[in-house]
Image (spheres, rainbow, N blue to C red):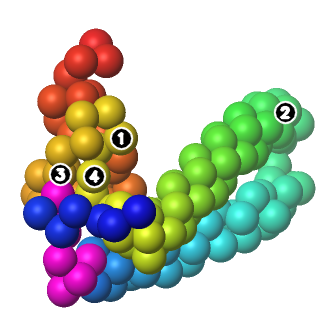
Amino acid sequence: MAVDTNNRYSDEELAQFKALIQEKIEKASHDLELIKSAYMNDHNNGTEDTSPTFKAFDEGSQVMSKEANSQLAIRQEKFIRDLKNALIRIENKTYGICRVTGKLINKERLKLVPHATLSIEAKNMQK
């Protein structure tokens, strides 16, 4: 199947998006590591010698903190997966094409949300 070059971004534009996405994957992976290390080190907040009341309160907040960290990690992993899928679309030269309308997604939108698969028009139709 030939790709309609009028309805896709040029190889040069795709290369620019690829660099942007790779940069975002690197940063997101680094952030994920920080979240995971915070999660691992969460068990010791230095409250061993404080009052039992505070310790009980601290343990409760610790559980909430672990849950929040876990949710953050899950969201970050999904974000990285979405970015990697965008790289696949770049390789296939289908990147930036709305999966509903078939039109090109606005460049500015892709710069802000590089893993977008819907144009604003399609996104608004969903509401």
Q: Quadrant of the N terminus?
A: bottom left
**Which badge, 4 or 3, is on the more N-terminal residue?**
4
Whole-percent x and y of residue 101? 24, 35
* Element assignment for label 3: loop
The boundaries of the magenta stretch are 7-14
Numbered tag placed on residue 99 in the rendering: 1
Q: Which residue is mark 2?
A: 56
**Which badge, 4 or 2, is on the more N-terminal residue?**
2
Residue appearing at x 44%, y 70% in the figure:
92
* Element assignment for label 1: loop
**Which badge, 2 or 1, is on the more N-terminal residue?**
2
Badge 4 vs badge 3, beta-carbon distance below 8 Å:
yes
Residue appearing at x 57%, y 73% in the figure:
29
* Element assignment for label 4: loop
Residue type indicated by callout 3 = Leu
Whole-number angstrom distance, CA of label 4 to CA of label 2: 53 Å
Residue type indicated by callout 4 = Ile
Badge 4 vs badge 1, beta-carbon distance below 8 Å:
yes
Whole-number angstrom distance, CA of label 1 to CA of label 3: 10 Å
The answer to whether residue 105 is left or right of residue 15 is: left
Whole-percent x and y of residue 120? 18, 35
Numbered tag placed on residue 104 in the rendering: 3
Most extreme residue toward the front is 1
